[in-house]
Image: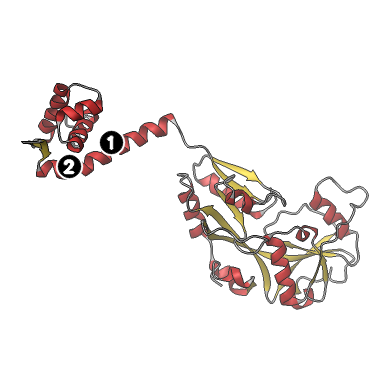
Amino acid sequence: MVVDRHGGVDLDPAAVRAFVAAADEGQFSHAAAVLGISQQAVSKRIAKLEAQLSVRLFERVPTGTVATAAGARFLPHARSLLAAAEAAVEAVRNPPRPLRVALLGERDGAMERMRFYLDRHRSDTEIVISNVFVTSRDMVVHGRADAAFARAHGGPRALPATIAAVPAYLDPAHLLVGRDHPLAGRSAVTLAEVGALQVWIPGAGVPSEWAGFYRELSEFCGVTIDTTPRSKPPGAGPDGIVAVLDRIAGSPGLATISSDNFRNPWHPHIRRLPIVDPTPAYPHALLWSKQNPHPGLPHLVDHFRSDYDPRIAANCWLPTADRTLFRV
């Protein structure tokens, strides 16, 4: 009998496999046929296992063999040992592909949160950037990503029941104006004051969950959402957000809404005003399919579930459908 230095028995997987086959088949000859070895080899392996365990595992009956009480107790553990061994071999031969996490864009606050996560957890993860036409929600629904940061409600189509969600973070809104705007000298602006404005948000013209957010915000406070496309001002860069900021910076009356966690390019003539009383906050959830077996998903979900702080929602406005998830 082989005993390791901690006192445990070093079981032979081949012997364990022979035991399980014999228990399942009821005869050593049938177990031999299943395993592709001789009946004598099955008998020797089981005898070796019985010697290691110091118990009888089978007794003879007229129809063949049946497990003893000790054998019956050992059988579920033997199955677990074989399953663990097979899983170990499979993991080495076919390592899981990287966990694919979809974000709406590189400037989005979810990117910084994923960098924080990956800096502290060893994870084979691939960040996938979506766009306004194939959103991160669409990517997780259609299986092109394992998880996605997106709003769980709103949009032209409701999420299927197979998609689960946990709150990831709330993104407080800011009003962006140029230096010549009447509000440029303010340190903050109330939501009631925003309600009297027309704000330009070209991205809200695309049927999406974020367009729904701004529609509901408009219904709540009265703000007019302008989604009209505008040509880029002369000298504007190729990035869409750069062109938007150049347009805002050069206008005495144009304004837009951005968020605290969105990484806008710096512009010397842009003034950022927090919106208060209450603060609109965009609800970013982490979405995934309940049917997705990727081994990296549970750890990612647990991280964001435990990292979310519901106290941030105390002074925020959220659409009604999102309030339960974010514990408002």
Q: Which residue is drawn at 46% across and 34% down?
A: 95
The residue drawn where x is 60% and y is 54% is 149
Q: Is residue 153 left or right of residue 178?
A: left
Q: Percent position (x, y) of residue 171?
A: 65, 62
Picture coordinates of residue 25, whole percent (x, y): 19, 35
Question: Badge 1 is on which residue?
Answer: 82
Q: Nearer the viewer, residue 317 or 252?
A: 317
Q: In front here: 322 or 69?
A: 69
Which mark is on residue 74? Answer: 2
Dot placed on the residue nearer the N-terminal end, 1 or 2? 2
Amino acid at pointer 2: Phe
Q: Residue furthest right?
A: 234
Camera-side residue of 30 and 135 = 30
- Which quarter of the rendered picture does the N terminus lie within? top left
Question: Relative to residue 32, is residue 157 depicted above or below?
Answer: below
- Direction front: furthest residue: 63
The answer to whether any part of residue 123 appears in the image is yes
How many other residues sit within 10 Å of disc 1, few (<14), some (14-19) or many (≥20)?
some
Crowd around label 2: few <14 · some 14–19 · many ≥20 (10 Å):
some
Q: Which colour scheme is used?
A: secondary structure
Please name the residue shown 37% across and 31% down the image: 89
Quarter of the view holding residue 191: bottom right
Question: What secondary structure is found at the residue carrying circle 1?
Answer: helix
Mark 2 secondary-structure assignment: helix
Q: In which quarter of the image is the C terminus?
A: bottom right
- Disc 1 versus disc 2: distance between alpha carbons? 12 Å
Task: Residue 10: give x, y in percent of width and height.
Answer: 20, 32
Amino acid of disc 1: Leu
Q: Where is residue 319 in the image (x, y as percent from the top left)?
A: 64, 71
